[in-house]
Amino acid sequence: MIDFESLLEFEESLGQSLNRSHKLILLALEAKIDQVREDDRNFHDDVDPALSCCSEAQPSVEELAESYDVREDEFARCNTCGQSLARAADAEAEAEAPAPASCCKMAMDKNKLASWSSLDKSYWASFMDNPSRTINTLPNYTELSCLRQGIPNCLRSFVWRKLFLLNSTKIPTSIQLVYQNFQHSYSVEVATQIKKDLSRTFPAVEFFKEARTIEDLSTILNVYANYDAELGYCQGLLFLVGVLYHHLQRNCELTFYALTNIMAIESELHDVFTPTMMSTISNQWANEFASIFKQVDTEFYTHLSSIADMSTFLFQWWLSFMSSHVPDLSIISRIMDFCLLQGWKVGIFKISLGLLVSNRPILMSLVEGDEEVVYQHMLNESKWGTVMGNLEGFFGELLFSWQDDLFIDFQRIESMSSSTSTSDTYPYASHAHPYTLQSLKSLPLFNLKSPTAPGRLRSNTTSTGATNQSQSSLFSFKTSSNGKYAESIYSNTSEDSLETKSFTDFLKLPTFAKKNHNSNEKSSGKMEDDLWAENKSLRLENDELKMMLGKAFALLNAPAGENEMEIALLKGEILQVISEE
C-alpha cells in the first residue's frame, strides 16, 4: 500500500529545505519519455508475433529485497571504508571469522527492509509502479533517495530497468528485431578487437572473467558495431556496457536497448565516440566545461589552465564514462545512477567538476613545470583519494552545490526557441536517431525477414586468415585513411594494431589543430590549408543540414495542424540553404 499523502507532505518539506528547481532531472525524464514513445511508434504492425515479449510479473519491493544476495554483487562496497560487502557478508556468516566493521554492517543493513522507514517503502513502491509519475511528483525525494543517499543495492537492477523502460514491461519489438538480425555479419577485425578488450576493461572483477559474461558482452558490442555503422566500436563503450550488463542481470537484449537508448537520447554523447565527429564535439565539450569551471572558481581555473592542458585528462575521463582508474566499484555504480537521472553529459560534467574541486588543495600547490605531476595524479586512482570515505558527501552535497542553470545552455535555448519544439531546446533533449530500424528497412542490403539475405554483405577471411576487403560488412567500423585515430580510444582494426595495449594507450587522443608548415613546404602547406578550410566548411554545412533534418523529423511526427509557425520558419531556413549559390 502506497501512502501518497505522506509522500507528498514529505516532498513539500524537502522542497522547502533543499530549495532546488530540479530542471535537470525533469528534463532528462522528458527526454526518456520522448524516446520511449519514439520506440513504441516503430514497427507497431507487421511484425512476427513470436518476437513480442509477454508482460512480466512485476516483483514487489519486499520480494526484491529478500531475493538480493550481496555475496553475488561485486559492485557492492562500503561507502565509508570501501571494503567489499560480499566479503563482509561472508565474515558475518562464519562464526570464527572476525566480525565485519560497523560501517560495513550499516551498509549491509541498508539492503534490509527492517532498516527502512515506512516512507522509504512507499517511495520505492511508487517508483516501481510508475517511475515517470514518481519522478515528476516527487523530484526532491527522488534526488534524496536515488542520488544523495544512493539507490539501494538490492533495488538497483530493477530501478535501472525502470529508468530505461519507464512504465513499459517489455523491450521494444524493434530492438529485439535489431538484436536478432544484426548477429549475422560481424566484422572480423572488430570482433577480434572486442575479444582482446574484454579481458582488460575490468581485469580485477571476477564477474567479467566468466565465459558467459565474455560471450554475451562480445555479442552485444558486435551487434551494436553493426547497428551503428557511424560509431562502430571503441573500447570506452565497454565501461558502460559492462556495468549495464551486470546491473541488468545479464539480460542481453535489455543491455543492448539501454545502450541504444542512451545514444539516441544524447546525440552529443554519441558523437563524442564517433570518429568523424569526435574532434568537433570533444573540443566543444572542453570549451563548455571550461566556461562552467571558470564561473564556479575563477582563481582555480586560471591557475590550473596555466600549468596544464586540462583536456589531457578530461577527454580520458569522458571517454571512459568516468569509470577508468577508480579504486572502488561502488563509485562506478553511483556515477551511473547519477548520469541516468541527470543526463549523461550533465552527469559527466558535474562529476568532472566535483573531482577537480575535491583536488583543489593539491592542484593549487603545483606550479608551472609540474604539468606531468598534474597528469599523473588526475589519471590515477589517487584523484579519488579525497572522495573515498565520504561518497554521500561527494554525490549528495558537492555535486548539488551548483544550480542546475549552470549546466543548461540558455544561449542555445534562446536562439532555437523560435523554431524548435520544447524537446529540442535542451542540450540533451531527444533527437531523431539515424539508426532506427525504420530507416534500415529502406536499405536494399537489409532484409528484415531474412537474416541471411544474399544482399547482406559479410566479413570473410581467406584461407590465410587475411580479411577479404572486397566483402567487408556494410556495418563494419571504418578508420580514417590517414590513420589519425590509430592511437586514440578507437580501436585500430588493422592487422598491425592488434597487439595488446594498456587502456592508457587507447586513450591517447589525436591532435585536432591545423598543422604548421615549414617555409620549404609552402606549396603543399597551402594545399593542406585549402583542404582543411574546405573540410571545415563542409562539416559546418553538414551539421546545419543535420540540425534542420532533425527539426523536420520531429515536426513530421507532430499531430496535423500543430506547429504551423515552426514549420513555416523551418521552410524558410531550408529555402535559404538550397537557394544559396
Image (cartoon, rainbow, N blue to C red):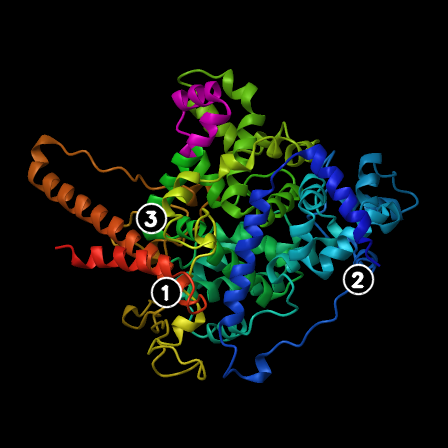
Q: What kind of element bears circle 1?
A: loop
Vertical comparison of 489 with 287: above or below: below
Q: Give the camera-side residue of 473 and 547.
A: 547
Specify whether residue 487 is in view. Answer: no
In-image side of 238 versus 168 (left or right): left
Dot 2 or dot 3: first in sequence order is 2
Q: Residues within 10 Å of mark 2 (few under 14, many from 20)?
A: few
Q: Position of residue 218 (x, y in %)?
A: 52, 63
Which one is earlier in the sequence, the residue at label 3 or at label 1? 1
Q: Amino acid at mark 3?
A: Tyr
The residue under the point 66% across, 68% down is 169
Q: Which residue is mark 2?
A: 60
Left or right: where 272 falls relative to 64: left
The percent coordinates of residue 237 (x first, y second) are: 49, 53
Q: Residues within 10 Å of mark 1 (few under 14, many from 20)?
A: many
Q: Which residues are magenta?
A: 290-312
Question: Type of residue at label 1?
Answer: Ser
Residue at coordinates 55% horizontally, 54% vertically from top-left? 30
Residue 475 vertical position relative to residue 451 in the rendered view, above or below: above
What residue is at 44 percent from the left and 65 percent from the top? Answer: 558
* Labelled disc at residue 476: 1
Q: Is residue 499 magenta?
A: no
> Residue 12's image quarter?
top right
Residue 556: where, in percent of width, then height? 39, 67
Of the pair 532 and 5, the residue shown nearer to us: 5
Residue underneath mark 3: 485
